[in-house]
Amino acid sequence: MKTEKKKFWYRLPLGKKILFEVTLTALVLFASNLFIYWQVNRTIQKVDTVYATNVNLSELSDALARVQEDLYSYISVQSSEALENYYRSEQEYTALLNGLNQELIDNPVKILEKNIRNMSDTYLHIAAEAVQAKRGRNVEKYKDNYELASRHYKYINGSISSLNSLQFKSNSARYQMLRQALEYMEIVSSVILICVMLTGISILMAITKDIVNPLTDLAHAAKLVGQGCFHLKMPPAKSDDEIGILTRTFNQMIASLEDYIDRIKESAEKEQKMMERELLMETHLKEAQLKYLQSQINPHFLFNSLNAGAQLAVMEDAEKTCTFLERMADFFRYNVKKGMEDASVGEEVEAVENYIYILNVRFDGDIHYHADIDKDVKQIRMPSMILQPIVENAVNHGIRNIEREGKISLAIRREGKILRMTVKDNGKGMSQEMIDKILSGEPLLHGGRNSNSTGIGMDNVRNRLEMYYDCKGIMKITSGGEDKGTEVTLEIPLKGEKENVQDPAGR
């Protein structure tokens, strides 16, 4: 049975062990306090009843005095008010008499209580006869009865005083006993609380020792491992709690670490040589990648757009055709001219507007475009052909072929040292899996190039921005899900006015 309990304790997690110990200590403390409270409360109740009898006797004496006074008032005045006061006082005194003893008990106090009760009954009877004689105008009888009642009153009052003295002496002795009991309870309560506290501390220390000692050994071993000693092992753990799992995992980690270190040593020289070669090629590789990415323009887009311009020349007046071709020429000129150099934010926005205009001519104005650009950001320099590919992606994969009205908005704001560009559409939206693939540069299942595309995709834009600004996480994509649109945000760092706002020739 002991072995089973021990195994059960070793299988418990640390949290449950500590909770069990704290709960047990709290329950013992609560039970101890409850017991002490019950004992002290009971003793206090006894103390409260010690002098209750003296108080009752004082009230009895006062009530008797009121009866005698009201009797005298009625005998002297014979008014209805005096008679009512007498009857009221008589009822109060009679009610208090019911609290006195009326049985034969071998106790001086109880015997005196019985005598006072009997005398009081006689006194009240004589007083009642005096009242009746007064009401019947029998002067001689009510005078005799009043004098007799007065003698009984004095004797009863003296007996009450004697009873009060006897009761006070008895109560004083009981009070001393109860006071000693309270002092004894105070000592016992202190001893109980100290024992419970010491027991709880001992149990907590024992549990803490089971937790802290293995952790201390583990920390010492980890320090040695950090200094390069990979041949030590922790003693096998007895428990199946977190400490035991951590110890066994640590031993497994040390064994795996030894094998890993051996493999690292074998490949260290090769990796060193590869790093030297990579460092040598890094500058040339980045430059080649940048030139390659910026040169990707799909000729199909220009071909189809010029086709649309030719058709428009046949169907409409020459003025619209001229406007279309001018816009098309501006767009083509921007692609060719800015392919290998930076552009201003204003030039990027103009390229987007030309692109939207061309598409609206081709597709009967189906695209509703809105731009909100801060005026003071238009001269800031940035890589070229950044915004148009993002807008193109919103058209081709967002709002194209949706039944509702397609909308695209462009917002550019300067926020401290960040230039925030946001392209938002109300189209098909995309899943989080698709967003993760785009941001990680993974190829998509529908990744064939669209014949109406400029050829510069989201991956191209992201790579150029990260290489240009030498930082990650510039592009962020969010979507509420299917048919809830997509929002692409670029957070471009501003290096300073001189570096961001300048003429291309002065770069």
Image: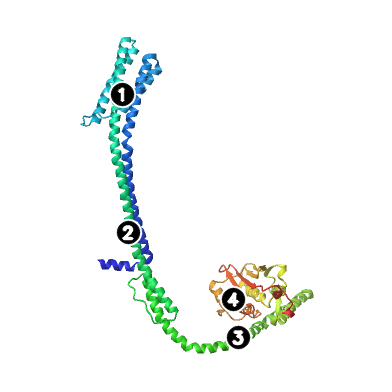
| 58, above or below 270, in the image | above
Q: Residue under label 2, please give it.
A: 199
Q: Secondary structure at mark 3?
A: helix
Q: Quadrant for the N terminus, please.
A: bottom left
Q: Contact, CB < 8 Å: mark 3 with mark 2? A: no
Q: Quadrant for the C terminus, please.
A: bottom right
What amino acid type is highlighted by mark number 2? Thr
Numbered label attached to residue 282: 3
Nearer-the-camera pick, 300 or 144: 144
Q: Between tags 4 and 3, which lies in front?
A: 3
Q: Which image quadrant for residue 7?
A: bottom left
**Mark 2 or mark 3, which is nearer the start of the sequence?**
2
Q: Position of residue 234 (x, y in %)?
A: 36, 77
What amino acid type is highlighted by mark number 1? Asn
Q: Position of residue 226 (x, y in %)?
A: 45, 78
Q: Residue under label 1, please give it.
A: 157
Label 1 and label 2: CA atoms lie apart by 61 Å
Q: Residue under label 4, please give it.
A: 472
Residue drawn at (33%, 34%) of the image: 52
Label 4 and label 1: CA atoms lie apart by 105 Å
Q: Secondary structure at mark 1?
A: helix
Q: Between tags 1 and 3, which lies in front?
A: 1
**Mark 1 or mark 4, which is nearer the start of the sequence?**
1
Residue drawn at (32%, 39%) of the image: 47
Q: Is residue 310 visible?
A: no
123 horizontally vs 369: left or right: left
**Mark 3 or mark 1, which is nearer the start of the sequence?**
1
What amino acid type is highlighted by mark number 4? Lys
What amino acid type is highlighted by mark number 3? Glu
